[in-house]
Image (cartoon, rainbow, N blue to C red):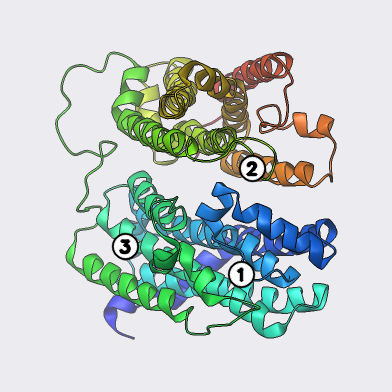
């Protein structure tokens, strides 16, 4: 084998063994969402008249139109494909790009890539191994969807295969995007931010791209493919072609850059002088991650301003009986919860990279952790302030929107508290526990809206009391704030007593 690709097969086996649980979760979620939509829509829309009415209401819903497009097929298969298209691309794309960054740039940040490269492992081996595994996982997803939808619900095999191929090819393309971002960026957090930004830009076109031109974006590929309708089998070739181009670009950059270097520097790295003194762990945490938090806040505020302005152009009634502004604010709050997890996992990232141990020799454990916890708890407050002010100024109701957004702060703190508690008790379980909570909470939203679970059970999740359809008062936010305080205390106490990650 060519020297630059030497060891690729060995790395494929190593990564597959190391991440077999995560890859199984990746496949399970990607397959379960369309199957759940097929089950729930069949129960909610049993007749043709109900499906036609649903399509008419969806056409009047600006959120559905902006994100999913118009309903062109009122059969149950067509509605399931319409409902699941962006969801499937989001799942396969996000999992693919995170997987790619994890096994390339994150390995360099941790110093393991240099150790591996000291053996008979070529420069392109890691990229090749990631691409092979990402494509293999997406092929498994395609196969399970092509078999599960026909066997479980009697859908046509051809339409199910085309639906799966579109999602799998899109996921492979975003994995290649993650590989390219890993070569461009100087740190894993920056690479993830860039790759996720590309994913969001491709899947959330909003109302600025006309329906007839949306096919140029990933969000438009399922619309053009028309699974279960006028099927266009050439559509999956488009993301595959992009994947080839992005993968080749990643190979070229990998061959020309130094190990650990990147075209886009990161404040969390060693580039640039430190101006002034870092007088506290909180100051160091801000130095490392403050720019990223500020970028998120500005982006959410800007997006909120646009959403608030656009919402005034639509009628107040939507599919759920709530205004477009209320629904989008709730979506923003769910996004803030995801970013809160990222912020709360920073101490784990610092410890895993070996940067915590030297600092702990100079300062106490509680003081070091408190700096990261303070920034992790302040970040969702700033982002929700930006969401409330942005949507409120755009819609002309700043005070009402500010209160609606800030009501979600205790829920975001509870998510951060759970992450910190898991980090203190079992650091390697922190990320799975935190992201599992987010996924389970999002699933409970769908289950509650579909009538599968009761209101009491839904209120126990972080996404419960902030739902536009509920008005629980201040008891639920106060309870979540108390839970967050207890969890942070548990995490801090556990961290003070346990050994560092070896």
Count neighbours of disc 3 (C-alpha within 10 A) and say few if under 14, some if 14 to 19, many if 20 or more: many
For the residue pair 198 and 220, the one nearer the viewer reads as 220
Identity of the residue drawn at 54% across and 24% down: 405
Q: CA distance from mark 2 to mark 3?
A: 40 Å
Residue located beneath label 2 in the image: 318
Tell me which numbered mark, 3 or 1, is placed earlier along the sequence.
1
Identity of the residue drawn at 53% across and 69% down: 223
Figure check: 89 above or below 382: below
Identity of the residue drawn at 38% across and 50% down: 197
Tell me which numbered mark, 2 or 3, is placed earlier along the sequence.
3
Q: Secondary structure at mark 3?
A: helix
Residue located beneath label 1 in the image: 72
Tell me the mark number nearer the camera, choosing from 2 and 3.
2
The reply to whether callout 2 and callout 3 are in contact (CB within 8 Å) is: no
- Left or right: 114 in relation to 311: left
Which percent across, then down, holds residue 80?
69, 65
Which percent across, then down, holds residue 325?
54, 34
User: Which of the 4 image quarters holds residue 81?
Assistant: bottom right
Q: Secondary structure at mark 1?
A: loop
Q: Secondary structure at mark 2?
A: loop
* Total tally of numbered discs in the picture: 3
Count neighbours of disc 2 (C-alpha within 10 A) and say few if under 14, some if 14 to 19, many if 20 or more: some
Count neighbours of disc 1 (C-alpha within 10 A) and say few if under 14, some if 14 to 19, many if 20 or more: some
Q: CA distance from mark 3 to mark 1?
A: 36 Å
Quadrant for the N terminus in the image:
bottom left
The reply to whether callout 1 and callout 2 are in contact (CB within 8 Å) is: no
Identity of the residue drawn at 39% across and 53% down: 201
Which percent across, then down, holds residue 257?
19, 61
Figure check: 152 above or below 269: below
Residue 52 seen in this snapshot: yes
Q: Which mark is residue 180?
A: 3
Tell me the mark number nearer the camera, choosing from 3 and 1.
1
């Amino acid at each position: 084998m060519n020297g630059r690709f030497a060891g690729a097969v060995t790395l494929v086996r190593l990564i597959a063994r190391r991440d077999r649980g995560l890859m199984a979760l990746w496949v399970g979620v990607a397959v379960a969402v369309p199957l759940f939509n097929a089950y729930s829509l069949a129960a909610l829309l049993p007749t043709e008249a109900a499906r036609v009415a649903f399509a008419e209401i969806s056409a009047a819903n600006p959120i559905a139109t902006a994100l999913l497009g118009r309903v062109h097929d009122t059969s149950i298969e067509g509605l399931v494909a319409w409902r699941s298209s962006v969801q499937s691309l989001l799942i396969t794309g996000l999992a693919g790009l995170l997987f790619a960054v994890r096994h390339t740039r994150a390995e360099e940040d941790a110093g393991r890539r240099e150790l591996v490269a000291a053996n008979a492992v070529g420069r392109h081996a890691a990229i090749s191994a990631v691409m092979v595994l990402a494509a293999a996982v997406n092929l498994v997803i395609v196969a399970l969807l092509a078999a599960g939808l026909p066997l479980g619900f009697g859908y046509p095999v051809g339409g199910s295969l085309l639906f799966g191929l579109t999602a799998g090819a899109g996921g492979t393309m975003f994995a290649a995007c993650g590989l390219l971002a890993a070569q461009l960026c100087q740190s894993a957090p920056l690479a993830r931010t860039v790759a996720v930004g590309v994913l969001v830009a491709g899947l959330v076109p909003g109302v600025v791209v006309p329906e007839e031109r949306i096919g140029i974006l990933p969000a438009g590929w399922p619309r053009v493919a028309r699974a279960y309708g006028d099927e266009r089998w050439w559509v999956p070739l488009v993301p595959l072609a992009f994947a080839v181009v992005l993968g080749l670009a990643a190979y070229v950059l990998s061959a020309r850059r130094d190990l650990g270097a990147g075209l886009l520097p990161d404040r969390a790295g060693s580039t640039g002088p430190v101006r002034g003194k870092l007088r506290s762990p909180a100051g160091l945490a801000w130095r490392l991650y403050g720019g990223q938090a500020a970028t998120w806040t500005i982006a959410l505020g800007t997006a909120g301003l646009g959403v608030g302005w656009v919402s005034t152009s639509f009628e107040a009634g939507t599919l759920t009986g709530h205004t477009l502004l209320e629904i989008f604010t709730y979506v923003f709050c769910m996004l803030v919860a995801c970013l809160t997890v990222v912020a709360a996992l920073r101490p784990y990232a610092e410890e895993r990279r070996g940067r915590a141990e030297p600092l702990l020799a100079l300062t106490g454990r509680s003081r070091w952790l408190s700096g990261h916890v303070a920034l992790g708890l302040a970040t969702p407050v700033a982002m929700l302030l930006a969401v409330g002010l942005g949507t409120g100024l755009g819609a002309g109701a700043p005070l009402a929107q500010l209160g609606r957004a800030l009501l979600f702060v205790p829920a975001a703190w509870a998510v951060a508290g759970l992450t910190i508690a898991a980090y203190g008790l079992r650091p390697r379980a922190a990320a799975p526990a935190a992201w599992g909570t987010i996924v389970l909470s999002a699933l409970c939203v769908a289950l509650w809206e579909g009538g599968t679970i009761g209101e009491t059970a839904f209120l126990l999740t972080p996404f419960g009391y902030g739902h536009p359809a509920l008005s629980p008062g201040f008891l639920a936010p106060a309870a979540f704030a108390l839970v967050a305080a207890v969890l942070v205390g548990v995490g801090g106490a556990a961290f003070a007593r346990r050994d560092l990650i070896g």
